[in-house]
C-alpha cells in the first residue's frame, strides 16, 4: 500500500488529530466519557494506521521495540507505585487521599496518575501485539 | 444485531466474518449509547470495532482466510445452545424491570458512589471515580491482565524469528559439509 497517494496524504492529515484526541480522552476522562483504556487504544490506533499505510518497517523506526516495551511496563509500574506511595504516606494501598494535603486534590492526582498508567500500558500492549502479528519482531 | 449474528454463523469466508464482527461491535456500541452507558460504548467502539478487527486481520494474514467446512452432525450442539438460551431467558424473568429504582443494583453501593463521588474526589464523571478510585484494585488487575497478554504474545510468537535466523547459517554449514 506504499504507493497510494490519497491514502498517504489523508492518513498523514489524520494521525496528529487522532493522537491529540487520544490525549484529550486521556486527560478529560475525569470530566467526560473516556479514560486510560480508551485513550490507550486510540493512541495505539494512530501507530497502527501509520504502519498499515507506510509499512511495518517505517513504523518500527517511529516506535522501536524497546520504546513500546518500556511503555508497556512503565504503565503498570506507575499504577502499582501510586498504590505503594499511598502505603508509604500512611494510607492504604491505592488510597489516594494521602497523596496531597487536601484529600480531594489527592484523589484527583491519584486518579490522573493511574489513568495515565492505564493508558500507557494499554497503548504499549496494543502496539506491541500488532507489530508482532504483523510479522515483525516485537 | 440478530441479522449480523446469523450471518456471522453462516459465512465461511473469514475476512467477511471479521468485518461483520466489527459491525456487530459497532451496533453493540450504539446499544450502549441508547442505554446511556457512554463510557462502555466508547470502549466497545474503540476496542471491539477498531483494534480487534485489525488484530483479527493480522491473524488472518498469518493463517488462512477460509474456514474448513465442518462435517455435518450439528443437532446436539444446536439443542444444547437452544436449551442454554432458554434457561438464560427464563433467568431474566426474575430480574427487576429496567430502570426500576428499587432494584438491588440501585440500592446496594450505587447510591454511596453517586453521593460520595463529588465530595470525595471532586470529579463530575462518576464512572471514572468508581473505576480508578473506589474499585482501584479491579482496575489494577485489569491492567495487569493486559500487560500479561502482551507479554504472553511477546514470549509465544515475538521471539520465534530470532532462533530461526541464528539457526540458518548453521544449517547451511551442515549442508555444505
Image (cartoon, coloured by chain):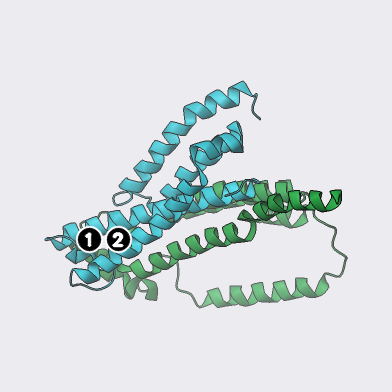
- Indicate which disc residue B97 carries: none
**Residue pointed to by mark 1:** A107
Residue A86: x %, y % from top left? 23, 68
Q: Chain of mark 1?
A: A
Q: Return the residue found at the far left.
A: A101
Q: Nearer the viewer, residue B131 or B101?
A: B131
Quarter the N terminus of chain A occupies: top right
Residue A89 vs B48, above or below: the answer is: below
| Chain letter for the cyan part | A
Residue B155: quadrant of the picture: bottom right
Image point (11%, 61%), residue name: A101
Label 2 and label 1 in one chain: no
Residue A106 vs B24, above or below: the answer is: below
| Chain letter for the green part | B
**Residue pointed to by mark 2:** B129
- How many numbered marks are there? 2
From mark 2 to mark 1, how far is it between C-alphas? 9 Å
Q: Chain of mark 2?
A: B
* Residue B45 in view here: no
* Residue A3 in view here: yes
Asked if the residue under mark 1 is in contact with the one under mark 2, i.e. CB atoms within 8 Å, the reply is: yes
Amino acid at each position: 500500500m506504499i504507493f497510494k497517494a490519497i491514502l498517504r496524504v489523508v492518513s498523514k492529515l489524520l494521525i496528529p488529530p487522532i493522537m491529540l484526541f487520544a490525549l484529550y480522552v486521556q486527560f478529560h476522562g475525569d470530566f467526560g466519557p473516556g479514560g486510560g483504556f480508551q485513550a490507550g487504544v486510540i493512541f495505539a490506533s494512530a501507530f497502527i494506521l501509520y504502519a498499515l499505510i507506510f509499512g511495518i518497517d517505517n513504523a518500527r523506526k517511529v516506535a522501536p521495540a524497546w520504546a513500546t516495551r518500556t511503555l508497556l511496563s512503565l504503565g503498570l509500574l506507575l499504577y502499582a507505585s501510586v498504590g505503594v506511595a499511598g502505603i508509604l504516606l500512611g494510607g492504604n494501598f491505592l488510597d489516594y487521599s494521602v497523596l496531597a494535603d487536601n484529600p480531594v486534590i489527592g484523589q484527583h492526582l491519584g486518579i490522573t496518575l493511574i489513568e495515565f498508567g492505564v493508558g500507557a500500558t494499554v497503548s504499549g500492549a496494543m502496539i506491541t501485539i500488532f507489530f508482532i502479528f504483523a510479522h515483525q519482531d516485537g | 444485531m440478530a441479522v449480523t449474528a446469523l450471518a456471522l454463523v453462516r459465512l465461511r469466508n473469514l475476512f467477511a466474518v471479521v468485518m461483520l464482527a466489527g459491525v456487530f461491535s459497532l451496533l453493540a456500541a450504539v446499544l450502549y449509547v441508547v442505554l446511556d452507558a457512554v463510557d462502555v460504548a466508547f470502549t466497545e467502539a474503540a476496542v471491539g470495532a477498531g483494534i480487534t478487527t485489525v488484530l483479527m486481520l493480522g491473524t488472518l494474514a498469518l493463517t488462512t482466510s477460509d474456514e474448513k467446512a465442518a462435517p455435518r452432525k450439528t443437532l446436539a450442539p444446536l439443542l444444547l445452545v437452544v436449551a442454554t438460551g432458554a434457561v438464560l431467558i427464563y433467568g431474566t424473568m426474575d430480574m427487576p424491570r429496567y430502570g426500576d429504582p428499587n432494584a438491588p443494583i440501585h440500592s446496594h453501593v450505587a447510591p454511596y458512589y453517586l453521593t460520595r463521588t463529588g465530595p470525595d474526589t471532586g470529579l463530575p464523571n462518576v464512572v471514572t471515580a468508581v473505576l480508578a478510585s473506589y474499585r482501584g484494585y479491579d482496575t489494577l488487575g485489569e491492567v495487569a491482565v493486559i500487560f500479561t497478554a502482551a507479554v504472553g504474545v511477546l514470549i509465544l510468537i515475538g521471539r520465534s524469528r530470532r532462533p530461526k535466523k541464528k539457526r540458518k547459517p548453521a544449517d547451511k554449514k551442515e549442508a555444505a559439509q
